[in-house]
Image: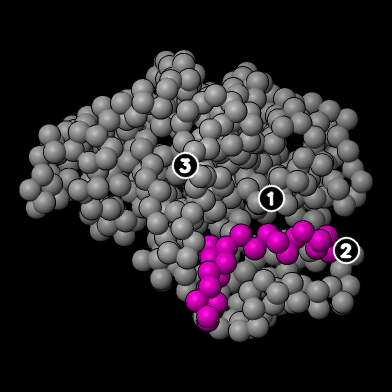
Amino acid sequence: MTSNAFNLYSQLPVCLQNLACSLAGLKIKRDRYDRTFHDSLKSLCESEWLTLAELQAYQDRQVARVIKHAYDTVPYYRRVMDENRLIPSDITKTADLVQLPLLSKDMVREYGDQLLSNSVPKKQMVEGHTGGTTGKALQLFADKGTQPRQWAVWWRHRRRFGLDINDDFIVFAGRNVIPLSNMNPPFWRRNIPMHQTYVSIHHMTKQNMPALLDYLQKRKVKYYSGYPSAVYLVAKYMLDNGITLPNPPDVTVLGAETLLPHQRRAMKEAFGGRITDQYGASEQCGNISECEHGNYHVDMEFGHIEFLPLKEDIPNVRRIVCTGFWNDAMPLIRYETGDLATISSENFTCPCGRKSPVVEKIDGRIESYIITPDGRQAGRLDFIFKDSWFIEEAQFIQENISSVKVKVVRSPEFKDEHEKKLLSDLRNYLGDVIQFEIEYVDAIPRTANGKFRQIISTVSSNRAN
Ligand SMILES: [Zn+2]
């Protein structure tokens, strides 16, 4: 929505805002769930049972196709392949991709239009942006088929848990559906064509939680979806206040941020049902989804993922590098997502029967690491939540190698001695060589699109580049 349109929308009464959301929903539904979507979903639900050799052969065919398309129609790839004395017949399978250089976010910024294919008219491209805590947002283009195919991959994941497009659901995410100046409930809007109720996470403050919970108790929906940090706020509030839902969701589907173990535990306790997660690169070039057994499978049909080493002393933590198969407007080949995953041992086979590779966990962003002066690297500081029921949220900010600022939102039970425990937990984990500065805050700011970052480090992002 443009800012003018949003200003106009903001002035409407709630019932008309709901109508506007439903009208927008009609268009989104038409674009997202088109013929391409239904065909892709059907084919994906069959291909997930192929053998590994069959899936790899499929990927090889896609790599050959994408490389030829890129060489023929994308100025950047034509130049890079010419410089490296490569022609399309040199790169016909996934193993051949290493001959091409990696593509960083900075390069995407720098080369801009040179990454666009001249086979797709720019008017037909869909423009998108990715956010980020460091650096400028990236401008990306996709052709019209990319989004329905991405949604088909996401719906294959949801189908594993018995969900259907026509099921009612509540989503907790970052779209501006409610003006920030709006201080009175409802903090949600209905989108009837998509069976969706959209809760604005920008309004999920302590003061507004009682009204939200009151509403959730009255609703009966098949599933919840949204950002882990937002859904966690609901679960934590329910557990802290002894609130239960008469009709809890059967399934909670997470994505868009790293799902941390303490968040998953709280959701399980608060809602029951199945809690499931998936990883999607925001550039729509790679995806990884949980199966019924809780293992993360690479969605091989959507793109090829290379798991490249990060550091010698943590050999299983790998950088996620993607080659997308479905965006002919702006093919991303060997694209550094800036995200990390921990790989499983090679001989792991998942009891679900799918043969696609499994990763043990998604670790989040590369800049989500604290680096200690003695050279250690620590991510996922969720250990501090294990016994720390007195902390609601915490964020770690590292701007230099010798100190870390910890922003803490205290729970009502917080007492002075808990600060000592927090500091001692941090020193036990990260050592005495780093200073901690604790700052108590009422809320942790989200990024512009409402995402929560547990660790923000300019030190590790500098090292990663
Ligand atoms: Zn599995």
Helix, strand or loop at label 3? It is loop
Q: Pick whichever of labels 1 and 3 is earlier in the sequence.
A: 1
Q: Pick whichever of labels 2 and 3 is earlier in the sequence.
A: 3
The residue singled out by tag 2 in the image is 412
Of 427 and 251, nearer the camera is 427
- Residue type, mark 1 in image: Pro
Give the residue drawn at x 61%, y 84%.
Answer: 433
Left or right of residue 216: residue 354: left
- Residue type, mark 2 in image: Pro
* Cα separation between marks 2 and 1: 23 Å
- Above or below, 100 against 384 in this view is above
Left or right of residue 337: residue 101: left
Residue 358 position within the rendered picture, expressed as x and y whole percent measured from the top left: 51, 38
- Residue type, mark 3 in image: Glu
The residue singled out by tag 3 in the image is 346
Give the residue drawn at x 87%, y 52%.
Answer: 240
Q: Is mark 1 within 8 Å of ligand 1?
A: no
* Mark linked to residue 274: none
Left or right of residue 255: residue 419: right
Residue 185 position within the rendered picture, expressed as x and y whole percent measured from the top left: 78, 44
Q: Which residues are magenta?
A: 367-390
Left or right of residue 24: residue 226: right
Task: Classify 10 Å Cα crowding around label 2: few (below 14), some (14-19), many (20 and above).
Answer: few
Helix, strand or loop at label 2? It is loop
Of 292 and 270, nearer the camera is 292
- Above or below, 94 against 431 in this view is above
Helix, strand or loop at label 1? It is helix
Of 98 and 232, nearer the camera is 98
Residue 117 position within the rendered picture, expressed as x and y whole percent measured from the top left: 20, 38
The residue singled out by tag 1 in the image is 261
Do the residues bearing badges 1 and 3 touch, measured as CB atoms within 8 Å?
A: no
